[in-house]
Amino acid sequence: RTNIAQWAFSIIDADDIRITDQVAWKVIQSLGAVDLPSSDRDYLYGIDDFDDWLRLLES
């Protein structure tokens, strides 16, 4: 999870990378938070969220 979040932030913070697809941009932003803890479970995002993001990208 940490590696994924770091990768996503490298895209978010890169001045030379422009993501024009809004769905892809939202998923990348969400991936930046995949390692955040939650008060009621281990992580803020779980497998169901990952599946939802994948479905969004595939549609």
Image (cartoon, rainbow, N blue to C red):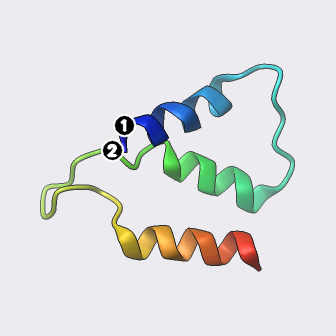
Q: Secondary structure at mark 1?
A: helix
Mark nearest the camera among 1 and 2 is 1
| Residue 6 placement, left or right of 35 | right
Residue at the top extreme, as displayed: 15
Q: Quadrant of the C terminus?
A: bottom right
Could you say which disc has been placed on residue 2 in the image? 1
Q: Is residue 29 above or below residue 44?
A: above
| Residue 52 placement, left or right of 46 | right
Q: Quadrant of residue 23?
A: bottom right
| Residue 49 placement, left or right of 8 | left
Q: CA distance from mark 1 to mark 2?
A: 6 Å
The percent coordinates of residue 49 (x first, y second) are 44, 70
Q: Quadrant of residue 27?
A: bottom right
Work out whether mark 1 precedes mark 2 in sequence or the reverse, and give the earlier one: 1
Amino acid type of the residue that numbered disc 2 sits on in the rendered structure: Asp
Q: Is residue 3 above or below residue 54?
A: above
Q: Secondary structure at mark 2?
A: loop
Circles 1 and 2 in contact, beta carbons < 8 Å: yes
| Residue 51 placement, left or right of 15 | left
Q: Residue at x 37, y 45 (%)?
A: 1
